[in-house]
Amino acid sequence: MSSISQDFAPPFKLIAPFFILGSFFYLISSLYIFSFNIEDLTFLNPEVLGFVHLFLLSFVMMTIFGAMAQLVPVVLEVGHFGVELFYAIWPLLLIGSVLMVFGFLFSPALLPYGGVIVLVSMMIFVMEIFMTIFKVEKLNLVMTSVLISNTFLFFGIIFGLLIALAYAGTIDLDITSLLRGHVYLVVAGYIIITIMGLSVVLVPMFTLSHGFSMRPLEIAIGLMTTGVVLVVISSIFNIMILEYLGYFLSAISLGFYFYLIYIIYDTRPRKENDVYAISLMFSYIAMLVSIVLGVLYFIMGSEELLLACGWVLIYGFFAFLITGHIYKIVPFLVWFERFSPLVGKQKVPMLADMVPYKSSQAQFIFSALGVVIVTIAILTKSDMLIGAGASFLVVGAVAFIRSLFYMINFE
Amino acid sequence: MVYTKEEIFSAISTVIDPEVGFNLVEMGLIYDAECDDEGNVKVTMTLSTKACPLHQMIVSWVKEAVEKMPDVKEAEVEIVWEPVWNISMADDNVKKALGA
């Protein structure tokens, strides 16, 4: 039998809980939207904060951490420092994020406890990634992006813990200022820089694109890094000019990143529009829409625009980028574990055969409609449309869970 | 020479890339193959991306496919990154199927 490198493909049982929990929390987040009252939608409303943490921690971070268990060795070209540590990460992240959501909704006293458990979970993750990066002899641009994003995550969770302590009344700090730093460190510094770095490895891998320059990525990561640092400095010292400069640089950074993705996509030899390709298209269009809404907010100052910007960013850009990649990552992991030892001995399925067509298409269509309807609902302040959008999102999330279990159980 | 380059390529064409569904030869990933009089084969190939998670498996599949040939004593597979693979190296049927 072939010698299979487990360094480059951790056992599926280690990664599966991240994806399964993530998919269920995608559904729970979608159900949560039914509870929104459009008049109460403001950024500091505890219900909104609870939703954002539920979605970002339990779905986005949970899924990203699981994906990183498999992708880090692929990107860094070395084995994990201690891949078994991932067995501890998901239970802690699960407990911590549930406690935090309950803290926002029912009892702020729970926030520090939830925050500390999330902190421990993320510290284990960050330290594992750092120790793995130390094994790399020479860092390339993508590896550097992993290092930068995880450094921002490290500081982002420190900020988050301070906010949780202040929110619960344990310490006295200006929550609003620190919140900007926390949000920017985690969302722009970790999630977006991670997406930038990994997507320029994964998108060309799946589309077979070659020969494009990495210069736009270099500029995008440089600008985003500077933008995050400026916003964080501003959140500590309250220097508004730095904050606006940080937002401006971040928007330009996303422009460069979008340009690179467009070049990769435009020159791709593999033209098929499977669920992966259409999910990514929707995701990047959502990113552009989010930038436009953000710019309009700065011009017009209406909070609905900022809420819609945040909504499209997390439920349009992040969610579709993640669900799209799940349709590539999960079949690979299942195939690697279940079918690769049979290569040359019997007929084995192709990875594309393991993706259920109907439920994956249903997931895409219902979720995309849901995102669009909720965006309109936020902008027009329509409770009825919020409910309608949530209904589409729930059906999309159920189809996503169905697709995930189909791929996991494929025989 | 025990086997010609074409015969070795034919043996390797049984190895399918599970992501794209084409064999490695028609993908244009196999650059060269030679066999000495004692049945030692050296295959020079590339991958469509340096970050391929199936890197080691594909190498072992190629090695196994070649070593299944009756008179092959040992096969060695070398991965090279120059020239960099691109779709123009693939067969026309692959390009057509992918829409390139």
Image (spheres, rainbow, N blue to C red):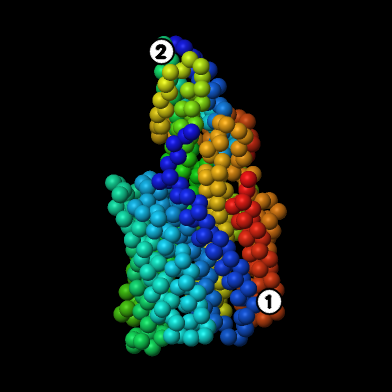
Residue A29 placement, left or right of A246:
right
In this rendering, the answer to whether A365 lies above or below A277 is below
Q: Residue at x 46, y 43 (%)?
A: B53
- CA gap between label 2 and label 1 equals 74 Å
What count of labels does the image hold? Answer: 2
Asked if marks 2 and 1 fall on the same chain, the answer is: no
The residue nearer to you, when weighing A390 against A109, is: A109
Q: Quadrant of residue A395?
A: bottom right
The picture places residue A215, in percent across and down from the top left corner, at 39, 50
Q: Which residue is drawn at 41% across and 25% down?
A: B76
Foreground tag (2 vs 1): 2
Label 1: chain?
A
The picture places residue B23, in percent across and down from the top left corner, at 57, 31
Badge 1 marks a residue whose secondary structure is helix
In this rendering, the answer to whether A12 lies above or below A367 is above
The picture places residue A13, in percent across and down from the top left corner, at 50, 54
* Residue count near mark 1 (Cα–Cα under 10 Å), binned few <14, some 14–19, many ≥20: many
Q: Quadrant of residue A377?
A: bottom right
In this rendering, the answer to whether A390 lies above or below A126 is below
Residue B7 placement, left or right of A354:
left
Q: Mark 2 points at which residue?
A: B38
In the picture, the disc for residue A387 is: 1
Task: Inspect this view and state whether residue A11 appears.
Answer: yes
The picture places residue A411, in percent across and down from the top left corner, at 63, 45
Task: Inspect this view and state whether residue A248 appears.
Answer: no
**The residue under label 2 is which amino acid type?**
Glu
Label 2: chain?
B
Q: Residue at x 46, y 32 (%)?
A: B60
Q: Which residue is drawn at 56% across and 26% down?
A: B13
